[in-house]
Amino acid sequence: MLMREKLGLIENYDEDQQLLEELLNLMQMDNVDYTILFRRLSDFDI
């Protein structure tokens, strides 16, 4: 639930879990700083 909120996923879709898993895997593979990534994502206007 918390990850969905951090990504701004308002509605619940079946694909959300897969999206989150893929994002976390990519972040781990590239040693991405979680805090910086989520801050940068929050800069986008929807």
Image: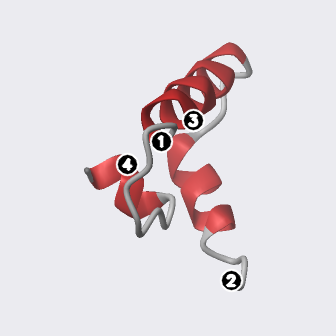
Q: Are marks 4 and 3 in contact (CB under 8 Å)?
A: no
Which mark's residue is nearer the viewer, 4 or 3? 3
Could you tell whether 33 is left or right of 15 in the image?
right
Q: How far apart are the alpha carbons under marks 4 and 1? A: 10 Å
Amino acid type, callout 3 = Leu
At a point 37% along the width and 55% down the height, the residue shown is 12
Tell me if mark 3 has few (under 14), some (14-19) or many (20+) residues whose alpha carbon lies within 10 angstroms of its own.
Answer: few
Question: Could you tell me the amino acid type at mark 4?
Answer: Met
Tag 2 and tag 4, C-beta contact below 8 Å: no
Under tag 2, what secondary structure?
Answer: loop
Q: Where does label 3 land, which residue?
A: 19
Please name the residue shown 41% across and 69% down the image. 10
Classify residue 25 by image quadrant. top right
Q: Residue 8 at x, y = what percent? A: 49, 67
As rendered, which of 39 and 44 lies closer to the eye? 44
Please tell me which residue lies in front, 27 or 33.
27
Mark 1 closeness class: few <14, some 14–19, many ≥20 residues within 10 Å: few
Residue position marked by numbered label 2 in the rendering? 46
The answer to whether marks 2 and 1 mark residues whose Cβ atoms lie closer than 8 Å is no
At a point 28% along the width and 53% down the height, the residue shown is 2
Q: Secondary structure at mark 4?
A: helix
Residue 14: quarter of image? top left
What residue would you read off at disc 4?
3
* Disc number placed over residue 44 in the picture, else none: none
Which structural element holds mark 3? helix
Q: Is residue 33 left or right of residue 3?
A: right
Mark 4 or mark 1, which is nearer to you?
1
Q: In the current view of this chain or complex, which residue is farthest to the top?
A: 29
Q: CA distance from mark 2 to mark 1?
A: 18 Å
